[in-house]
Image: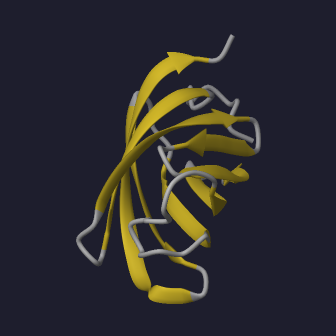
């Protein structure tokens, strides 16, 4: 659960870069146990858990919805990602990888824009 005083619930701006050197940006909402977001071509849905040490784990499905597919990992129409990092607000960084190819990694830098009501 993320509603434990760390202030994670809210709208976040995300900048991400893959091990392939491709950059992207989007927005996402972190709420209790869920993550929802989008960029210009993909939407994101997933689960969020936090352990007692303050680490968060995000299991994310990224699905193409507009234009030509072009993610930070190529032209896939759907991706599954695992992300992990230390919970903090108003900024934090997560490290992750493709579920089906852990050699393809990514870094996500997050900046909180607004709290949820």
Residue 72: image quadrant is bottom left
Q: As drawn, is 63 to the left or to the right of 23?
A: right
Question: Which residue is pictured at 35% across the width and 61% down the height?
Answer: 107
Give how far across and how far down residue 32 sits, in percent: 75, 36
Q: As drawn, is 5 to the left or to the right of 107?
A: right
Which quarter of the rendering shows the C terminus? top right
Answer above or below: position of 12 versus 17: above
Q: As drawn, is 49 to the left or to the right of 70?
A: right
Question: Which residue is pictured at 44% across the width and 65% down the height?
Answer: 71
Give how far across and how far down residue 45 sits, in percent: 70, 51
Answer above or below: position of 91 versus 52: above
Residue located farthest toward the front when viewing the structure as drawn: 67
Answer above or below: position of 60 versus 81: above
Question: Which residue is pictured at 60% across the width and 87% down the height?
Answer: 100
Give how far across and how far down residue 56 sits, in percent: 58, 53
Q: As drawn, is 19 to the left or to the right of 13?
A: left
Give how far across and how far down residue 41 sits, in percent: 51, 51
The front one of 5 and 47 is 47
């Amino acid at each position: 659960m993320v509603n434990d005083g760390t202030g994670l619930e809210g709208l976040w701006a995300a900048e991400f870069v893959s091990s392939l050197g491709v950059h992207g940006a989007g927005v996402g909402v972190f709420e209790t146990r869920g993550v929802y977001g989008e960029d210009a071509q993909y939407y994101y849905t997933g689960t969020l858990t936090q352990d007692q040490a303050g680490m968060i784990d995000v299991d994310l499905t990224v699905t193409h919805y507009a234009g030509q597919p072009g993610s930070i990992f190529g032209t896939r129409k759907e991706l599954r990602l695992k992300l992990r990092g230390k919970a903090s607000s108003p900024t934090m960084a997560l490290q992750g990888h493709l579920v089906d190819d852990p050699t393809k990694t990514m870094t996500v830098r997050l900046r909180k824009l607004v709290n949820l009501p």
